[in-house]
Image (tube, grey):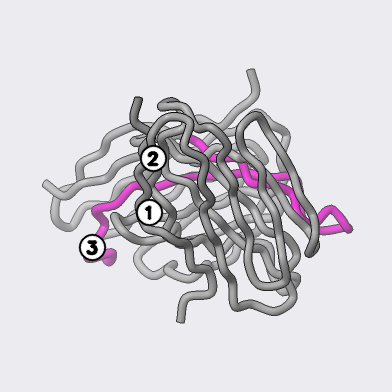
Amino acid sequence: DGGITQSPKYLFRKEGQNVTLSCEQNLNHDAMYWYRQDPGQGLRLIYYSQIVNDFQKGDIAEGYSVSREKKESFPLTVTSAQKNPTAFYLCASSRSPAGGLGNQPQHFGDGTRLSIL
Amino acid sequence: EDQVTQSPEALRLQEGESSSLNCSYTVSGLRGLFWYRQDPGKGPEFLFTLYSAGEEKEKERLKATLTKKESFLHITAPKPEDSATYLCAVQLFSGYALNFGKGTSLLVTP
C-alpha cells in the first residue's frame, strides 16, 4: 500500500543534541512538507519542498534543517538551537501544486512525538 | 491574527444527534479549503477539498459546504466511531502550504 512512513514514533532529545526525524513516501509525490503540532494550536509549517534538491522555509523554520536528496525522502533535523522542541511532528506529501495542479490534498504520516530528556 | 478559526473547540453529541462544525477564514485569494479528520496519536486523514463558494461534497455521514467566508462540516446521525478532531485548512493562490485552524474535538457518545 502506498503511504508515508515516519520514524521513530517516539524520540527523546538530550540538551545540546541534534536529532533527525525520518520521512519516506512511496506515493510518487513531488512535494513534501514538515509541520509541528502543539496542544491547542493548529499545525504550523516548518519547511516544504516542491522538488528534489530544493526546499523553502515555512513559518517556524528557526532551529530546524532539512534535506531533499531523493524524491521519496525528506528528513528533518531538530538542532540544539531549537529551544522548545517538544511537539508532535508531522510529515506530509502531495502531487506538485505547480503547473495548474493546485488544490492537491496533502497526505500525512502518523507523526513522531519528540520530548526532552 | 488567525486566518482560520474553527468553532466550537469541542462538541459532545449523542449518537444520532446531527450537528455542524464551522470553519471561518479571513484570507483573500483562496485556492482551496481542506477538511481533515485526526485521531489521537495519528496524522490527519484527508476528507474533502472545496474550491469555490456553493460547492458541496459528501462522504458517508459527512457533508462539507463552502461560502465566501466559511465552511461547514455537517455530521448526520453520528456514530461513536466519528469521534475525532476535525481540522480545517486553507491554501492560498500565493503559496502551496496549508494554513490550519486549531480544530474541533468531537465526542459522540452511545
Chain letter for mark 3, please.
A
Give the amino acid at mark 1. Answer: Gln
Using the numbered discs, state the Cα–Cα distance from disc 1 to disc 2 in whole angstroms: 26 Å
Can you say which quadrant of the picture contains the N terminus of chain B?
A: bottom left
Q: Dot 1, crowdedness within 10 Å: few (<14), some or many (≥20)? A: some
At 41% from the left and 27% from the top, the residue drawn is B80
The magenta stretch is A81-109
**Residue A17, image x and y in percent?**
21, 52
Which residue lies under the disc numbered 3? Answer: A84
Which residue lies under the disc numbered 2? Answer: B13
Q: Dot 3, crowdedness within 10 Å: few (<14), some or many (≥20)? A: few
Seen from this angle, which residue lies furthest left? A117
Left or right side of A49 for B52: right
Which residue lies under the disc numbered 1? Answer: A37
Mark carried by residue B67: none
Along the line of sight, which residue is nearer the eye, A100 or A40?
Answer: A40
- Disc 3 + disc 2, Cβ < 8 Å: no
